[in-house]
Image: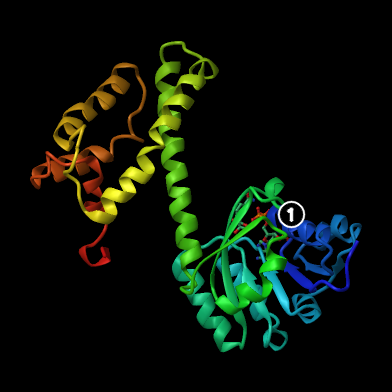
């Protein structure tokens, strides 16, 4: 049931995620106008009170606040550029995944068209949208975030991470990088035990407990990286880890399991060791990943 006292919102893009976003706005009572290239996808939302616009221009004209969730950056620029006259004075919240540079490019483009721009990174899958466990990172216009936060909270937990329009995309990709690192480790672990006939489901409890215990390394690593102190209280030093790491590769080979997910870390460990950091912790390897001038 839409509540005419609530701000109207337009959603451009009704894929799996755009439909979930529009559904959450409707559930929160926002008058919601939707547009999608394939118009049939609007039908379930129209059944719940949305208004379907025939064109991006019609959709933009309906609301000051516009949420964009399309396939990629190029599609966003193409769709918005199709309705330049309706853009001025709008607040565009782009929730399409992209890189920080793409978000910054969109911010420049938006400013040229008199659009207030927020960029966002959705840390959820569509069924999670509409409840607090879904969180969305926003960066760009602080004024736009403050003005529209209560509307954006319909999607989940909203978090503003900075005025740099690329910051939300950067943190989104940093979080996904952490996630894929974990997925790589989980895949390797299951491949190893499967090579000896152990079912993944049987190994899952011990792997889960181990990774949960190891997650304590996340704040520890952060403190060491921020302070640059890689020597105080080191328990498992880099020299030991560089000697032990090849066992992971050799064991995989012995079991007929590919080590290609694990192999890239070894040359970094060896370079850091060769640079004279053998007595330090492993987190000093970050200095091989970031350029000198990137560090605070
Ligand atoms: N799904 C997730 O779990 C998830 C999670 C976080 C972030 N995201 C991000 O959310 C964004 C949308 O994801 P999604 O899952 O909704 O993807 P999707 O289901 O593939 O939907 C893609 C959307 O883009 C539209 N589109 C594609 N090419 C177009 C073009 N040339 N012109 C106009 N519209 C075009 C599609 O329109 P048609 O319907 O006409 O094809 C559809 O509305 C992506 O950037 C994705 O990375 C998704």
Does residue 78 appear anywhere in the picture?
A: no
Residue 68 percent location from the top left of the image: 67, 68
Quadrant showing the N terminus: bottom right
**Location of mark 1 (residue):** 20
Name the residue located 21 percent from the left edge and 63 percent from the top edge: 292
Quadrant showing the C terminus: bottom left
Residue 223 percent location from the top left of the image: 30, 50
Name the residue located 43 percent from the left edge and 54 percent from the top edge: 174
**Secondary structure under badge 1?**
helix
Name the residue located 21 percent from the left edge and 32 percent from the top edge: 236
Dot 1 alpha-carbon crowd within 10 angstroms: few under 14, some 14 to 19, many 20 or more? many
Residue 10 left/right relative to 237: right
Residue 235 left/right relative to 204: left
Does residue 131 appear anywhere in the picture?
A: yes
Seen in the picture, residue 18 relative to 252 is either above or below; the reply is below
Total number of numbered discs in the rendering: 1
Quick check: which quadrant has ligand 1?
bottom right
Residue 232, quarter of the rendered image: top left
Residue in the foreground of this view, choosing between 37 and 263: 263
Seen in the picture, residue 197 relative to 207 is either above or below; the reply is above
Residue 119 left/right relative to 2: left
Extreme top residue here? 197
Residue in the foreground of this view, choosing between 157 and 118: 157
Residue 294 percent location from the top left of the image: 27, 65
Residue 16 percent location from the top left of the image: 71, 52
Seen in the picture, residue 105 relative to 271 is either above or below; the reply is below
Query: Which color scheme is applied?
Result: rainbow
Q: CB at mark 1 closer than 8 A to ligand 1?
A: yes
Residue in the foreground of this view, choosing between 268 and 65: 65
Name the residue located 46 percent from the left edge and 25 percent from the top edge: 209
């Amino acid at each position: 049931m839409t509540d005419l006292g609530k701000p109207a919102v337009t959603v451009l893009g009704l894929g799996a995620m755009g439909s979930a976003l529009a559904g959450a706005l409707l559930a929160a009572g926002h008058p919601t106008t939707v547009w999608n290239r394939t118009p049939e996808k609007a039908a379930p939302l129209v059944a719940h009170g949305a208004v379907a616009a025939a064109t991006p221009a019609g959709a933009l004209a309906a609301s000051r606040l516009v949420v964009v969730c399309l396939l990629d950056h190029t599609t966003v620029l193409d769709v918005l550029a199709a309705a330049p006259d309706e853009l001025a004075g709008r607040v565009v919240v782009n929730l399409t995944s992209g890189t920080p540079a793409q978000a910054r490019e969109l911010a420049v483009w938006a400013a040229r068209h008199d659009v207030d721009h927020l960029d966002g990174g959705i840390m959820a899958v569509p069924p999670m949208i509409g409840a607090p466990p879904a969180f969305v990172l926003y960066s760009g216009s602080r004024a736009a975030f403050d003005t529209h936060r209560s509307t954006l909270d319909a999607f989940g937990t909203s978090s503003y991470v900075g005025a740099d329009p690329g910051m939300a995309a950067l943190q989104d990709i940093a979080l996904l990088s952490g996630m894929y690192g974990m997925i790589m480790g989980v895949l390797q672990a299951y491949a190893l035990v499967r090579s000896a006939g152990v079912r993944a489901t049987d190994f899952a409890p011990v792997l889960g407990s181990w990774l949960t215990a190891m997650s304590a390394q996340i704040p520890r690593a952060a403190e060491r990286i921020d302070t640059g102190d890689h020597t105080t209280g080191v328990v498992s030093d880099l020299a030991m880890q560089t000697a032990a790491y090849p066992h992971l590769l050799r064991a995989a080979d012995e079991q007929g399991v590919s080590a290609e997910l694990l192999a890239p870390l070894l040359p970094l460990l060896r370079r850091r060791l060769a640079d004279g950091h053998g007595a330090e912790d492993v987190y000093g390897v970050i200095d091989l990943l970031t350029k000198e001038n990137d560090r605070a």
